[in-house]
Structures are given as C-alpha cells and as structure tokens.
Image (cartoon, helix red, strand yellow):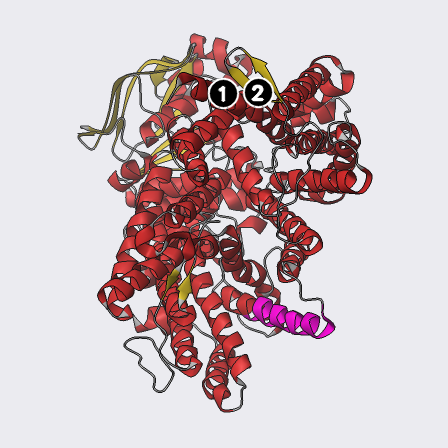
Amino acid sequence: MPLDIYLNVIVSGVLTGLVYGLMALGLSVIFGVIRVVNFAHGEMMAVAMYIAVVLFSSFGLDPLLMMVPIAIVLFAFGYLLQARLINLFIDRPEHTQFMLLVAVAIIIVNTLLMIFGPDAQSVQTSYAYDSFQVGPLIVDATKAYAGIAAVAVSAALFAFFRFAPIGQAIRACADNHTGALVVGLNVNRLYALTFGIGAACVGAAGAMIVLFIDVTPALGPAYTLLAFVIVITGGLGSMPGALLGGVLIGVTEAVAGLLFSPSAKSMFSFALLVLVLLFRPQGLLGTAQR
Amino acid sequence: MTALLQVDGVSKRFRGLRAVQDVRFSVAAGQVFAVIGPNGAGKTTLFNMIAGVFRPDEGAITFAGARIDGEPPDAVCRRGIGRTFQIVRPFPGLTVHENVVVGALLRHPRAAEAGAHADAILEKLDLIDKRDVPAASLTLPDRKRLEVARALATGPKLLLLDEVMAGLRPTETDRMVHILAGLNAETGLTIVLIEHVMRAVMALAQRVLVLHHGAVIADDAPAAVVRDPAVIKSYLGTEALG
Amino acid sequence: MRALLFGGIPARGWTLLLGSALALLLLPLVASDYLLTVLILIFYFAFVGQAWNIMTGFAGQLSLGHALYVGLGAYAASALYVHFGIGPWIGMLAAVVLSALVGAALGFLAFRFGVGGVYFAILTIAFAEFARIGFDHLSWVGGSSGLFLPVAQFSRNELWHLRGHPLMFYYLMLALAALALIVCRGLLRSRLGFYWQAIREDEPAARALGIDTFRCKMIAVVISAAMTSVGGVVFAFYYNNLFPEQVFSIARSIEIILGPFIGGVGTLIGPIAGAFLITGVSEGLIELLTGVGLAVPGAKQVFYGICLLAVIVLMPNGVWPPLAAALGLKRGKPRR
C-alpha cells in the first residue's frame, strides 16, 4: 500500500487520538486525585454526544461552539455525582466504589437507550466533508478542528493545575489526603470539583468527537473501556500519559482498521491493555506505585 | 549447641538507603531473643527478610540447617517460622475462631481437627470466650493476642513477634509476657521479638541484639546490653540504668 | 464428606431448605408455562451466580467478564453438536476443559504478574470483549450472523440431546442450582474455602500463614470458569441460537453478578436469593410495563441499575444476611 495512505491514516489516528486523550485525561484526573475508578466515564461521553446531537438537530448549533456549554452541563453532573453520592463512599473498599459507578453507568446507558433508541445518530455540519490538503496529506476538517480543540482544552487544563490556586489545592489533595485535611482544605468540596472537571473534559471531548463519530448508547461502555486502556497504557495518574496513550491508541486503531478489518481494531487495544498490565503496569509515563 | 536460626552478613538496601548492614547473629533453639533499637534501625526489615517478604542483597539466612533467604513467605512459614505484623492484620470478616483455624489448617488439613487445635490455642491465649466474635470488633490488646494465636496455630518452631507489646497497658503487657514465657517454657518454642517496651524485654529475653542505623552495635545478655555505653547513647538513655 | 456438605445446618435451616425444595419440585403442577420459563431463568442465574461467587465472593477476585465462560461453554458444545453431532453431555466435557484452560490462562497472567483488585476486573472485561470480537469473526461458529441449533418438535423429551419441553429444562436447572449450592457449601467449609477467605480478607497475612496464594487463586478461577461453562451449555441448548454480540456482552456479565450482589456476595444463599429477587421482580416489571405499553428496550436494565445502586447504598452486604437474621438462622457466612 502506498506510503501516502499510511500517512493519512496515521494523521487521522493522531487527531482522533487527541480527542480520546482528552477524554482519558478526565479519567486520569479523577483517578489521580480521588482514587475512584470511574466506570461511568464513557457513558458520560455518550451523554455529551447526545446533547450535541439534540442541540444540532433542534437548533442547528455547531457542536464545537456548544463545547463550552456542554462541558459546563457535564461539570455540574460530575460535581453533584461526587458531592451527593460518591463522597459517601470514600472510605468504603475499592470494589464497592467501583460497583457504585457500574450501577450509575448501567442506568445512564439504558436511559439513553430508552430515550433515543439503539440506532446511530450523527451530526452533519456544513464542513463535514471538507478537508485540508497539506502536501501528500489529506486531513478531514472535522478531525482537524477536533484535534486542535482537544489540544487547546488540554493545555488549559494543564495550566489550571499548574498555576491556579484551586488547581494546586487539588494536586495537594492528590499527593497527601491527610496532609490536605490538616492544612484546612475542604477535601470533599475539592473532590467534587475534581470530578466536575473530569466530567467537563469528557463533555468537551464528546462535543468534539460527535463531529465525525456517530453516537449510539452502546458507545458508552465501549468508550469507558477505551478510556481505561488509554489511561493504563499511558500511566494511571499521569496527565501527559493520558494524552500520549490516547494518541497511541488512536493510531493503533487506525492502522489496525486499515490492515485488518475495522471491527477488529478494538481487539488490538485490548491486546495492548493486557500487555501493558502484565509488563509495565505503571504505564508508559506513570510512576511505579501500585 | 547448633543454632536454630543463623543470620550471616545480611544486608538490604532500598534505593539509596542502607536499611540493614552486615547483620550477623544466631538464635539457639528454645531461646528467647530480643531485637531492640531506635526507630528506623532496620529491625522490621530484618524480620521481613527472615520471613521471606524481602530477599537480602547479601548474606545468608539459615533455619534448621537449610538456607531460607529468598524463599517466599508461605514457604518460610511451612518450614516452621511463624510471624506477626507490626500493625496487626486480622481477617476482619472472619470470627476469632475462624482466624485461628486458617493458621491451624497448615498442619491439620482437616477442618474438624483444625477447629479443635484452634480452640486449644485460643485457650492458651485467653481468647476462648471471644471465640465467635468477628475479628473486626476486637480491641487492640485482643487483636494482638489473636495475631499471636493465629501464628502459633501454624505449629512453628520459631515465632517472630514484631512489637507485639506496642500500645498495650502495663497489665496487658504483663499478661502477654506471661503467656509468651509460658509457651517458651512448656513447649520450647523459640521466640525472636522486636520490642521497644524494655519491661517486656528484660522479663523475657535471654539474649538481646541492638541495631542502630542497620548495623549491630551489641549482642549480649540483657543485663550487659543495658549497661553498654553505645546502646545507652544511641537508644536507651541514662535513665535505663535505673 | 457428609459432615462437610451437610453438617452444621440448624434445624430451622433444614426446614426452610427442604420446604423450598419440595415446593419447587411440585410447582410445575400448578404453574403456567410462562412461570416455568421465568423460574428456569432464575435457576440459571442462581447457578452461574454461585459459580461467580466462588471466584469473587469466596476468593475475592472481582470478575466483571464472566460472560466469557458462559459463551465459551455455549459455543464449544454447540459447535460440536452442529458440526459433528456430538451430544451436549459430551460437549459439556469439551466446554468445561476449554473454559478451565482460558480461566487458567487469565489467572496465570494476572496472578503471576501481581494484577489484582480493580485492574484484575478490567482485565476480565478485556478478555470477554476480546472473545466477543473474536467470535464475531470466527466463521466456523457462524461469526456475527450467529450459530443456530436444529430445533426439533417437542414431541418427546430427550435428555441426552437436551431437546424437549421447558419442563425438562426446569428440573435440569433446578438440579444444577441445587448441586451448585451443595458444591459451594462443601468448598466453603473445606480447607480451600478457609484459605480463599483468608486471601480475600488479607492476602499478605494469608501468605504469612503458609498459604500458597497463587495456587489457591488459580484453583478458584478454574473451578469458577468450569462451573460457569456448564451453565453456558444449557443456555445454548435452551435458546438454540447464539450471537457473540449477545452472549459475550458486558450486559450478560453484569446480569450474572446482579444476583450475588443483591443477595450477598460471599454468602451461600445470597446468589439464590438475589436471583429470585432480581429476576422475579424484573420480569414482573416487564409484564407491568408491557401492559402499560412502556416496555422499551433498556427499561429492564435501568431497573437493574437502580436495584444495584439501591443495594450498594442501603444494604452493601446484600439482602440475605439481614433476612437470615430475621428468620432466626445462625449467624450468616462471613461477608466482605
């Protein structure tokens, strides 16, 4: 196969991977700080995608423009979920917290199924079939915009955690829970804020990805699994790792879809997950502390 | 008299930190041997190496004539070394009796016999009336005795006790000392204990090893160790002289 | 052996057990065909729930991909029947061996490399998903178009070929569920059972007591996988069609764990009580919704999700322990 095609597929994979990475970033933040394994992550992404679809089909609003409002809605959802439900379970064993979110995920997915039905829904923007030509590369406009948006949001997130006082407070919680309490930080509120931020990432990512991926309720669990593969591959608790993992998975999927059949691409992601769990459980960029 | 436990030139490093340096001592069968020293001296690391949790970087550990360094914890237990943990680890969802049965099953594979053996151990450790209580609801002194009972149920020749008196009031300490002394006298059980509570050390130990910064600074009878200037300087303080 | 399996049950417990058994044996005399099918489903979930419970409830290794073993069992026996005419009872042997091997592989990979807790759960999901996609592409078993077993008329019951009236399946599943209960009780009260619980509660402490935790965990996974696959075989011959998307899906895995979670993970009666509750109530709910015209896809699962949430929040140890206490039975089996 000519090199051009590979190159195009890889670039496409990178751009998609950046959006995956943003989604996984949300998961990484949640786990890194609260130590809760958010099994409803992909489901929240599906919710964001459906909101974008509804806004587009009812009011003609472009998902990229709606990215911020959707992110805010997801933020609120995440905040409340943590504040009202998950915070009660902070001291319970891991399995219980995990199952709690499994239950939430089941409810979300099937509520979406009840409301929207199983058929795929999509957003066809005016630029859905446009593309840019850069030398031998032909890049889809939707993916280009989504990729750029993902990088922008990720950068904003990094900056927030680095420079904003609240961001630093959250990092303090993550580093040392008891220490944070002793210093007088309202840990529960910070946890809720963190979950909200993680959910907002997912909201933004959902708004972006719906530009080129059709949404069905089944996408929820699929994306949850994908987010875990990415975060574990990149390194649990490492923000750059999430992005790197996302790009890696995006490219792997794209290339596997090209070489084998499109439906087999998830198999490679799982194979990668198994390999990572076995041989480098801390992930590519994670710290070895399991 | 050949030693039951022989530790020869054992060292352990954690990244940059030398936790244990060239430690050498031997414990005779039937002896009560204490290991003391300030916090961070490497006592628990030493125990963990004997118990198989860590492998020593250098040196050899010999038990009943066989090399055991590097063997996993379950293999070490099967050879006849029982251990307790510094922070007690009962099985919270099981009753006191069931906790000890788990230990007893090692040498009594049939559940009925293990149950009977467990009850006998509980009698010795004064826990028999709490037999059917969930372990999670025990007080600290009871948990400590449960920890000892469980390790004892595995039928060890040597028992490693890691700060088993920590957190106990003087009367409870005396109770534990009485039980341990009884076990040693009646069954010839060899006991190696890490201890900060000098009252217990003086009452029980026939020999004391003092560690400081991972190295041995004294290895002698209790009366001599307590008067050793290096030990006083690094750990005991002049009040210990009484 | 008799003491292990049947000893230590209080008189009241015997009464309840035998009374329920009798009631269930005689029920088909008065029950409608529909009720029979609901009960078959209940017994099926009680059976696979017990099998799952061995690995997760007893040994503490959380499996969220148990549909893998159901599917492997179902496909193994079905493929042998469809392609070679091999009866399901022989096919079951192949199913059990296959599932045991896959379980062993999963266990080995995980336990040798220290993968536990939530990571292990994710690994189980990944294996199930891998199978789902893999079988979609496996044309020898029909791929995504499905595998169909020849359905004869129910003129007579052929237990050997598992062809027959639902009544046959009713008694078969009831027998299997009862057998599972007896086997699990025996396991739990044996040395292995104690060792499993110790591993579940605190693995390093268990090792310090001389327990070879790797071996014990492996045995738990293999027994659980093998037992689950038996359920898969019956599942295949009852429904007569298999689609990878459905059989291996994560929704199936979640259905398997609902019974034990609601009834009480790690208890003996939990999976049974939970299966009765969740299946009974959800089928009732579907009847209700259908009558009102609201039986849309997803409604049943939303209900499952809400039940699971309610149990986790309000009764984390499940419904059975308080129920057992209220019935005056001896203090229940240890919980997590």
Are there few (<14), some (14-19), or many (20+) residues within 10 Å of tag 2?
A: some
Amino acid type of the residue tagged 2 in the rendering: Val
- Depth check, front residue: A145 or B125: A145
The image position of residue B35, as x and y in percent, is 40, 24
Instruction: Please state if B144 lies on the left or on the right of A170 as rendered.
Output: left
In front of the other: A41 or C212 = A41
Residue C268 part of the magenta segment: no
Q: In percent of the image, x 57 and y 39: which residue is there? A: A224
Instruction: Label 2: state its secondary structure.
Output: strand
How far apart are the two marked residues, 1 and 2, measured between alpha carbons?
Answer: 7 Å
Which of the 4 image quadrants contains residue C294?
bottom right
- Which segment did they paint magenta? C276-293
Q: Residue at x 51, y 71 (%)?
A: C42
In this picture, residue C190 sits left or right of residue A175: left
Q: Position of residue C81 (x, y in %)?
A: 27, 66
Residue C265 seen from this side: no
Mark drawn on residue A8: 1
Given residues C68 and A113, the one toward you in this image is: A113
Q: Amino acid at mark 1?
A: Asn
Determine whether label 1 and label 2 are within 8 Å by CB. yes
Indicate whether B153 appears above or below B21: below
| Mark carried by residue A139 | 2
Which image quarter: residue C207? top left
The answer to whether residue A212 is seen in the rendering is: yes
